[in-house]
Image (cartoon, grey):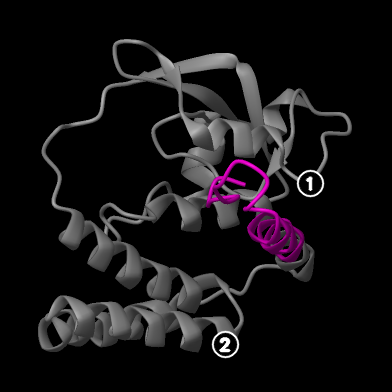
Amino acid sequence: MAARRVLNARVAVGADNTTDPTCALMRASPLGRVGLPGPSLIGLMAGACVFRAALYREIGGYEPRLFIGGEETLVSLDVLASGHAIVYCEQLTLHHHPSPVRDSALRRRMLARNAAWVAWLRLPLGEALSATLRALDVFAREGTLMRDGTELLAGLAWTVRERRVVPRSILAMRDRVRAAERNLDASATTTVGGKFDAPI
């Protein structure tokens, strides 16, 4: 049923409309496409997907406390937990013109913080603890451990309060994607490099 799908478009980057490399990875998703217009995914690209408005409202939209940097991971998990599919749909195209001005260090820290918060919100305890330690390591390497670490740990109050671990079936989908990532890494010397990133 079309209403139970979120569609992720092909992303054409820049003036020459080069296809974003992530699209090739989504096309090769190990999750299959039975009964769907494209391969199943475990994630979506925040600016390149099509929702039913009712579904967006049902899952609560994007969590404002995450702001930006991995915020789509929480949405993806909630979409899947609600019984909807996320699908790569090459018939849709989004044109993306990246900003030439980016704060890469800030983005790394926000990605790390948000990964930890999302893990506490939706993933098993072991993953939440691991994501927290990884985030603290990022902050230490960036020289912001006191400031960002304090913010991260303070946020555990609301993330634990709103914690709802996703069903095992979704965790199994993630395991399949991780296995595909490991296989890709193992063959990196003979194939095009890259990973099945968050959108898959």
Secondary structure beneath dot 1 equals loop
Report the front residue among 86 and 105: 105
Task: Find residue 118 and report its horizontal and vertical position in percent.
Answer: 45, 69
Crowding at dot 2, Cα within 10 Å, few <14 / some 14-19 / many 20+, comes out as few
Does 17 lie within the magenta span? no
Crowding at dot 1, Cα within 10 Å, few <14 / some 14-19 / many 20+, comes out as some
- Of circles 1 and 2, the one toward us is 1
Which residue occupies 76% across, 23% down? 37
Question: Is 190 situated left or right of 16 in this image?
Answer: right
> Looking at the picture, does residue 52 appear above or below residue 187?
above
Report the front residue among 180 and 43: 180
Instruction: Count the marks.
Output: 2
Instruction: Give me the C-alpha separation between circle 1 and circle 2.
Output: 25 Å
Which kind of residue does numbered mark 1 sit on? Leu
Report the front residue among 170 and 181: 181
Range of magenta residues:
175-200
Residue underneath mark 2: 125
